[in-house]
Image (cartoon, rainbow, N blue to C red):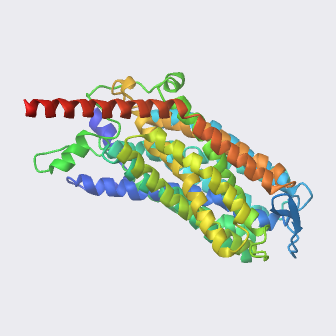
Amino acid sequence: MAQSHETTSRKPPGLRLFRGAKALRNYQTLVLVLTFLAYTCFHMTRKITSIVKSELDPQTKVGSAWGRLHTRNTLNVGWYPFNTSDGSALLGEIDVAFLAVYSIGMFFAGHLGDRMDLRIVLTVGMIGTAIFTALFGAGYWLNIHSFYYFLVFQMIAGLFQSSGWPSVVAVVGNWFGKSKRGLIMGIWNAHTSIGNISGSLLAAALLKYGWGWSFAIPSFIMALVGLVVFFFLPVSPEVMEMEIDDGETNSDKDIAKEPLLEPRQEVKHKAIGFLEAWRIPGVAPFALCLFFSKLVAYTFLYWLPFYISHTPIGNEYLSDAMAGSLSTIFDVGGVLGGVLAGHISDRLNARAITAASFMYCAIPALFLYRTYGSMSMTSNICLMFITGMFVNGPYALITTAVSADLGTHSSLNGNSRALATVTAIIDGTGSVGAAIGPLLTGYISTESWSAVFTMLMAAALLAGLLLTHLVCAELRGKLSSSVSKCVANAQATCSDQV
């Protein structure tokens, strides 16, 4: 009776009103939609600062080609203290402070996610993010020009943001099976790019009313979605008292009996420890690979609109709003890259080979975008799309399917309370790189954008090299499998001839 009362109390308030059995597919659809919307909102609010950068800091000296500097004329006076000579560096410091707190908070969020109600953790994270993102924008109406005001509120927003990713991955993991995991999670992970796109378009459209509105409206939307999550998100089949009866289809049974977390027996496991999670085979190399992968991805996330608005395309400069809208092409490419990486890794059954290949392909893509992206609008769009595909592909693969694979590793002996912690470790480590990339860009870009792209190409190379051991292991496994098949076919042929 007590256990039944506890389960009932953990049900979302909005779903307690509905009595009777519900189809498993309905709950799965609800979970997919709500987690997709939730993390779309996280990235929507995260993207705002990159769009507003050019409004705060109308920098005039920018590089348009390897080694050459040009001047951009602008009537925008900016916003003190970001319109000073070190304005780009100050914006870079705010980015790194946000991401540093985010990466640290990620490790704690993973532990909380394995020990607390994920619906509450996710809701608090969304509402908190909305409040402090809005307070950052409130500096516009309050006429605040203190650097530390913006720094502190952005750091607190980063802390609340850290609860998002471990929570949504764990919730989806409770409801969905392993079949085509890479493809399914690659499609679901489109929320990252959709959030970036919607944040870019919305913030850019609101700039003409004042940059404060670019923070206020997305924050309000996120708060509303957070309330919907609180009232309607079912975190697991157990909370909803789901049982499989004879009337269900075989596919439904398979999904219910083979959840992403793969519990092989009805045993309550303790949540996995931090150091124990690091010792899971594959966690360390993929986490370090994500460090450099997110360094590249987040440099584009925070600085691409600024770069576009300060670099002539076809000998013409774009407005801040137009640059923000154009930057969404990178995220459109990222959607395709995430789906392709997931599908290819499923077909090849080779996560490391796929991730490393994408990172190596990102190197020439970055070089071509920097060298030829300013020739015309067409070349900029095409090369930006290709760059986004190769940069975001492995980032999406590692943070979703790879994290799920490692969170259910055979060394865990069926422990279903490891996914949030493993996800937090991998994405938390990656977020350290995500903090360093924008920070370095803030300083390096004042001298040369060519040096920035050189840094990004080096990071992409290191990301691929860090997976070398796992790539070799996958290649040996495939070679051994091929040899075994050839031997078996040869033996079968000989038997037929005899």
What is the quadrant of residue 74 in the picture? bottom right
Image x and y of residue 116, in percent: 46, 36
Residue at 60% over, 58% down = 387
In the picture, measured across the screen, residue 416 lies left or right of residue 68, that is left
Image x and y of residue 146, in percent: 86, 54
Residue 428 vertical placement versus 22 (above, below): above
What is the quadrant of residue 306 in the picture? bottom right
Residue at 49% over, 26% down = 277
Image x and y of residue 239, in percent: 32, 42
Rendered-image quadrant of the C terminus: top left
Which residue is at the front of the view, 455 or 488? 488
Q: Can residue 390 be seen in the rendering of this structure?
A: yes
In the picture, measured across the screen, residue 221 lies left or right of residue 487, that is right
- The extreme front residue here reads 497
In the picture, measured across the screen, residue 105 lies left or right of residue 443, that is left
- The extreme right residue here reads 85
Residue at 32% over, 53% down = 28
Rendered-image quadrant of the N terminus: top left
Which residue is at the front of the view, 367 or 297? 367
Q: Can residue 222 be seen in the rendering of this structure?
A: no
Residue 49 vertical placement versus 72 (above, below): above
Which residue is at the front of the view, 263 or 112? 263
Number of numbered discs on residues: 0
Image x and y of residue 427, in percent: 56, 40
